[in-house]
């Protein structure tokens, strides 16, 4: 494993935003940007593994993204299934364990099959835990984890509360969480980048990790150099 000169965040979360604008700026339909964005995912996953990130959580499709036109939603699901199928062997070879969080019952059958397959094939991976958030809502995940909710409604899905996020990066210029990991980001360092997701490279990630390493995380205590 390639070592880095700085402290790498253990759990990195990425809001991969800006695919549509990336395509529109080039005079292409929005789906073109999703195709380019999917290529970026592969670069980013492999770079995080190389840098020694333990857990990487990617926001691929939010529960609110169902409000988009049907053809865009269908294109996204086809792309997810295609890339999951294509990458599963490679992920397994790289020691990357892939899990999908979010609702599955509304996804197309082919995509559900691809998810079950990649989770099974990569289950032994110990180098990097990759979580892909698909049809995901953080508010729904928190609600499902509440005992009172489970008692009243009956638990239908496993709660998907993840370990705390150390660094959350959102591309695309927006400064909001859009219902992503609200609980897990309680003490996350937040980084908002203006660059669009398909333009992200390994260098973008290294710059983000360097920025993270310079931050003074206090968790409510006093700065490390403060005297009593
Ligand atoms: C993020 O890019 C990908 C998904 C939400 C699936 P967008 O599709 O939101 O791109 P912009 O924000 O419209 O540019
Ligand atoms: C957040 O991006 C969801 C994903 C990146 C998957 P959106 O583009 O859907 O978020 P809003 O609509 O700008 O808040
Ligand atoms: Mg967007």
Image (spheres, rainbow, N blue to C red):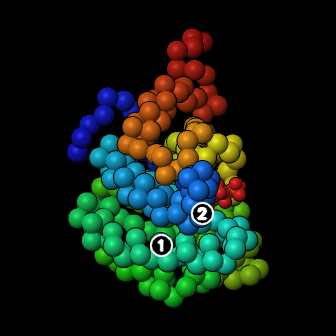
Residue at 73% in and 71% down: 67
Q: Which residue is mark 2?
A: 30
Quadrant housing the C terminus: top right
Residue at 30% in and 34% down: 4
144 to 218, vertically: above or below: below
Q: Earlier in the sequence, mark 2 or mark 1?
A: 2
In three-dimensional space, the C-alpha distance between marks 2 and 1, rounded to whole angstroms, equals 13 Å
Q: Which residue is mark 1?
A: 79
Query: What's the mark number on residue 179?
Result: none
Q: Quadrant of residue 64?
A: bottom right
How far from the left and from the top, in percent, is residue 39? Answer: 41, 59
- From the viewer's side, name the closer residue of 27 and 14: 27
How far from the left and from the top, in percent, is residue 26? Answer: 56, 53
Quadrant housing the N terminus: top left
**Can you see residue 149?**
yes
State the SS at label 2. helix
Q: Residue farthest to the front?
A: 27
């Amino acid at each position: 494993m390639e070592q880095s000169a700085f402290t790498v965040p253990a759990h990195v979360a990425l809001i991969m935003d800006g695919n549509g604008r990336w395509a529109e700026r080039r005079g292409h339909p929005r789906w073109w940007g999703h195709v380019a964005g999917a290529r970026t995912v592969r670069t980013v996953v492999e770079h995080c593994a190389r840098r020694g990130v333990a857990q990487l959580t990617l926001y691929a499709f939010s529960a609110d993204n169902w409000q988009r036109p049907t053809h865009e939603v269908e294109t996204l699901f086809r792309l997810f299934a295609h890339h999951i199928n294509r990458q599963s062997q490679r992920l397994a070879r790289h020691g990357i364990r892939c899990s999908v969080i979010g609702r599955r019952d509304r996804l197309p059958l082919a995509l559900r099959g691809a998810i079950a397959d990649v989770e099974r094939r990569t289950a032994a991976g110990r180098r990097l835990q990759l979580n892909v958030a698909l049809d995901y809502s953080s508010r729904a995940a928190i609600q499902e984890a509440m005992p009172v909710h489970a008692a009243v409604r009956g638990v239908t899905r496993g709660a998907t509360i993840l370990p705390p996020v150390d660094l959350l990066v959102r591309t695309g210029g927006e400064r909001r969480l859009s219902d992503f990991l609200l609980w897990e980001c309680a003490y996350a360092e937040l980084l908002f980048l203006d660059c669009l997701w398909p333009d992200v490279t390994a260098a973008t990630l290294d710059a983000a990790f360097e920025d993270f390493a310079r931050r003074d995380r206090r968790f409510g205590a006093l700065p490390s150099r403060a005297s009593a």
